[in-house]
Image (cartoon, helix red, strand yellow):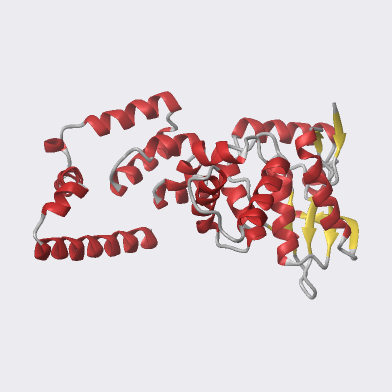
Amino acid sequence: MSSPNLLGRRAVVQESSQEAKETIGALLGGATKRELLQVPLVSIRVEEQVRREFPEDAHRALMENIRAQGGVIEPVIVNRRPGDSRYLLVAGERRVRACQALAREYEAAGDAEQAEKFSFVPAIVYEDLTPEQMQELQLSENLLRQDLTDLEETLALCDLLASRLGVEAGEVPGLLERLEKESRGQRKVGEDFEERLRVVEEAFASYSRVAWRTFVKHRLHLLRMPADVVAAVRSRRLTSAQAELIMRLPDAGMRERMVDRVEREGMPLEELAQAVQMVIKKPVASQAPDVQVAIRVRKRLTPKRLLALPPESRRRVQELLEEVNRLMDGEVAGG
């Protein structure tokens, strides 16, 4: 059974998401300046959202739905800063994108009247949302969606937990692993154990499709993807499913070439899996010289061999590895 939620969407009512809806309602209710306006698309600024993947078929379906309805029925949410003539999008990026595409389509067809019609969207306009409220609203609204990819949900949950626990997003995986061990008695319980456990359990009960312990066991590996692969997902060059295949390639250069190939050829997942496997199994001698060196070093650089080296050799290896790490960081930052 469907019913309209507090953000104007149609969502499947589930017991697990009821607390999330109440949280969103409380946050919205705390804002004193609110009005419903028809807002021009050109006045809406979109910054990075939780949702990073927009499948073409779903995008086209939404466009046709909006076209059939004669416009957007469910308002987007925007925030306007004092003295700023533009609006910052809080929720509703898919609807904004669909209307932009419709306006362009009608403009290209020479239908100025229809192009104008789809150049506006109904929006709930707030003028006093704090950055913290906007982040919580955006994360909450997007996590309520049923079609997030595993990587999107994982990144969003880590961002939400970081906000609620007062830590950096990069600290969340380690914190969850520590919390999981403490809860099973495998680690001494810290002073803040009860409070952090409460925050984590509440967040997962409200927003996640999986229990937090299952998340620790089966999802945290997604955050260990190489930085270049995660960046490709964030920039929408890859889907999370494609990323999980490409992350198996051991070299950044290999991964970037495969990303370029995916973009150029539009490979289906099965074909991509085969291409990745072929690269992995490719004989070392047939690889580029720099890749040959990287593969040989990677195979030989085991903890056992490193510990067996004389102290002076170990120090020299450490210096060289630190230099390699700096160079790789510079390559990723420069890309």
Visible residue check, residue 33 = yes
Task: Using the image, determine if residue 302 lies above or below residue 132.
Answer: above
Residue drawn at (84%, 44%) of the image: 8
* Name of the residue lying farthest toward the bottom: 83
User: Quick one: quadrant of the C terminus?
Assistant: bottom left
Residue 56 rendering spot, x and y as whole percentages = 60, 34
Residue 222 rendering spot, x and y as whole percentages = 47, 42
Q: Nearer the viewer, residue 174 or 242?
A: 174
Image quadrant in which you'd find residue 47? bottom right
User: Quick one: quadrant of the N terminus?
Assistant: top right
Q: Nearer the viewer, residue 126 or 268?
A: 126
Left or right of 92: which side holds 27? right
Residue drawn at (84%, 30%) of the image: 2
Task: Using the image, determine if residue 117 lies above or below residue 68.
Answer: below
Left or right of 253: which side holds 320? left
Q: Nearer the viewer, residue 227 or 45?
A: 227
Residue drawn at (59%, 35%) of the image: 55
Q: Nearer the viewer, residue 95 or 233?
A: 233
Image quadrant in which you'd find residue 40? bottom right
Number of numbered discs overlaid on the protein picture: 0
Residue drawn at (71%, 64%) of the image: 132
Task: Using the image, determine if residue 17 lies above or below residue 33.
Answer: above
Residue 127 rendering spot, x and y as whole percentages = 83, 66
Visible residue check, residue 100 = no
Residue 163 rendering spot, x and y as whole percentages = 65, 59
Left or right of 197: which side holds 29? right
Task: Using the image, determine if residue 242 lies above or below residue 28.
Answer: above
Image quadrant in which you'd find residue 18? top right
